[in-house]
């Protein structure tokens, strides 16, 4: 195995190649020595019962150690564990705390989750539409189809204090549709029935300009009125 791989990468490669015993031993050793990635993946083994005993408490303990070290993937998984109550006492508040840390760490799916939390006032946060919009934008700019679809609907309807903008809505919904979001595809059909020929032309020109290396489509969509 390459000396340039991290310990966790080497261990996972060994498991994938059929040497489960060695791979699990490497992860366990690395986890006990404080390697965050090893702690996370060792925890996942216990969560899935693959190569280690199925034990959600052990899984949560190891994943928590990795999350405390700032590993976004571990923070995201810990958020899910608290939301579902696997291996830990169920807590929407703690779930929200870890989702927010994972979002701050750059994970698009958690940025989308946090946006929804602020939009509806869930998981221990108060409703804050401006913050929700900001997180939707962060996730959408990382090509998260769900966030792109949400922004498309927001711009289409003029929600969250955003000025209605059908052209920008078209851009986001098109990107979400290309990303495989079925809801966005249906919303895009509805949107096109509301748009004038001039608006459709403008939207398509913007999309073509972005594809040709111009400004990123909808880079700052859904701005609230100043």
Image: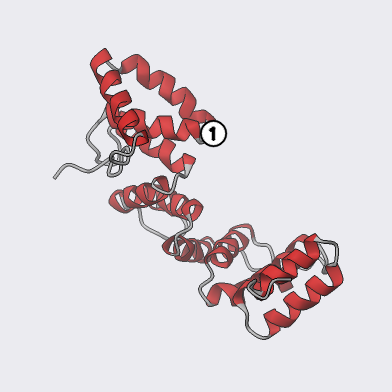
The answer to which image quadrant residue 220 occupies is top left
- Left or right of 164 on screen, residue 6: right
Residue 129: x, y in percent?
A: 31, 48
Seen in the picture, residue 130 relative to 203 is either above or below; the reply is below
Q: Residue furthest left?
A: 226
Residue 49 visible: no
Residue 76: x, y in percent?
A: 55, 61
Picture residue at 68% right of the left edge, 71% below the top: 8
SS at badge 1: loop
Residue 85 visible: yes
Residue 144: x, y in percent?
A: 47, 44
Picture residue at 53% right of the left edge, 77% below the top: 69
Mark 1 crowdedness (10 Å alpha carbons): few <14, some 14-19, many ≥20: few
Seen in the picture, residue 184 relative to 85 is either above or below; the reply is above
Residue 155: x, y in percent?
A: 30, 34
Q: Residue furthest bottom?
A: 33
- Left or right of 107 on screen, residue 225: left
Placement of the C terminus among the 4 image quadrants: top left
The residue to which callout 1 is attached is: 180
Picture residue at 73% right of the left edge, 63% below the top: 47
Q: Which colour scheme appears in the figure?
A: secondary structure
* Front one among 39 and 126: 39
| Number of dots carrying numbers | 1
Placement of the N terminus among the 4 image quadrants: bottom right
The answer to which image quadrant residue 195 occupies is top left
* Front one among 209 and 46: 209
The answer to which image quadrant residue 166 occupies is top left
Seen in the picture, residue 44 relative to 147 is either above or below; the reply is below
């Amino acid at each position: 195995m390459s000396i340039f791989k991290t310990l966790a990468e080497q261990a996972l490669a060994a498991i994938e190649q059929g040497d489960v015993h060695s791979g699990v031993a490497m992860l366990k050793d690395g986890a006990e020595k404080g390697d965050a990635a090893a702690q996370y993946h060792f925890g996942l083994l216990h969560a899935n019962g693959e190569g280690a005993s199925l034990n959600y408490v052990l899984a949560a303990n190891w994943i928590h150690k990795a999350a405390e070290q700032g590993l976004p993937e571990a923070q995201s998984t810990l958020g899910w564990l608290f939301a579902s109550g696997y291996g830990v006492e169920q807590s929407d508040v703690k779930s929200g705390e870890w989702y927010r840390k994972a979002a701050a760490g750059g994970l698009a799916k958690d940025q989308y989750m946090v946006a929804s939390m602020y939009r509806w006032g869930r998981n221990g946060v108060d409703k804050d539409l401006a913050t929700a919009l900001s997180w939707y934008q962060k996730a959408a700019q990382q090509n998260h189809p769900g966030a792109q679809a949400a922004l498309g609907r927001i711009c289409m309807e003029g929600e969250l204090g955003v000025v209605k903008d059908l052209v920008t809505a078209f851009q986001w919904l098109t990107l979400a549709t290309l990303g495989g979001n079925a809801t966005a595809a249906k919303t895009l059909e509805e949107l096109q029935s509301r748009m004038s020929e001039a608006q459709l032309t403008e939207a398509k020109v913007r999309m073509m300009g972005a594809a040709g290396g111009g400004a990123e489509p909808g880079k700052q969509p859904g701005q609230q009125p100043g």
